[in-house]
Amino acid sequence: MSAQPNYRHYITEEEYLAAERQAEFKSEYLNGEVFAMAGASYEHNLITGNLVTSLNNRLGDRNCTVQANDMRLQVSEAGLYTYPDVSVVCGEPQFRDKAYLDTLLNPVVLVEVMSRSTKGFDRAGKLQFYRSIPSLRHYLLVASNAVNVMSYSRLEDDIWRIADYTGLTDLIPLTALDLELPVAEIYRKVPLPERSAQA
């Protein structure tokens, strides 16, 4: 999410959605303000593609779907509309408006690939907002300039376990999907500093 809103006045959620469905470029929305989204880097796009491919391959024929960063997400308690880099839904997807099917409500897994301009909000703001989604079980924060994945997993009693993965041989458990995600697959063909790639 960029630092400056597109509009200086507040708009309603309905006004935002109507404008967004006609817009040439994506914007996010938080409590009446609209924020333009910056373009993604080469590394960012490679990582996002790798995540979608790896998750799809591992999920196989299970009743789960993987969406890339064009699927809008509504976090209703926070007044936030955003575009996660990757989202996974298991079972029947729920949408804000059945006439459009463009605003998801019930992800099980969310992934944000961090860039310099978004890492602060991804780590702090979005983490707090995403934790209010009842269906969410895993949130991954993936660095785009080093081998580093932070995993937040919801346990019983709404306790969240945090784990950090910095080795290419590491496996990230996604228990809600009954699979392990190899870090090496996330960073496949991604140009990284030599020391980071060997970590």
Image: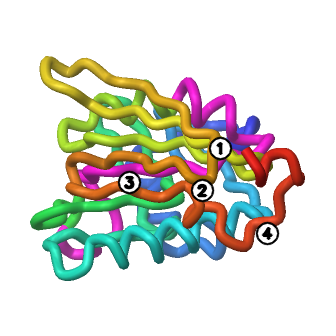
* Residue depicted at 79% across the width and 63% down the height: 41
Label 4: how many Cα within 10 Å (few below 14, some 14–19, many 20+): few
Asked whether the beta carbons under mark 4 and mark 1 sit within 8 Å of each other, the answer is no
Residue beneath disc 3: 73
Per the image, label 2 sits on a secondary structure element best described as strand
Per the image, label 1 sits on a secondary structure element best described as loop
Q: In the rendering, which numbered label is found on residue 27?
A: 2
Name the front one of labels 4 and 1.
4
Which sits in the foreground, 177 or 127?
A: 177
Q: Amino acid at mark 1?
A: Met
Q: In the rendering, which numbered label is found on residue 1?
A: 1
Label 2: how many Cα within 10 Å (few below 14, some 14–19, many 20+): many
Q: Amino acid at mark 2?
A: Ser
Placement of the N terminus among the 4 image quadrants: top right
Per the image, label 3 sits on a secondary structure element best described as strand
Name the front one of labels 1 and 2.
1
Distance from the alpha carbon under mark 4 to that under mark 1: 18 Å
Q: Quadrant of residue 157?
A: top left
Q: Amino acid at mark 4?
A: Tyr
Distance from the alpha carbon under mark 4 to that under mark 2: 20 Å
Q: Which residues are magenta?
A: 98-125
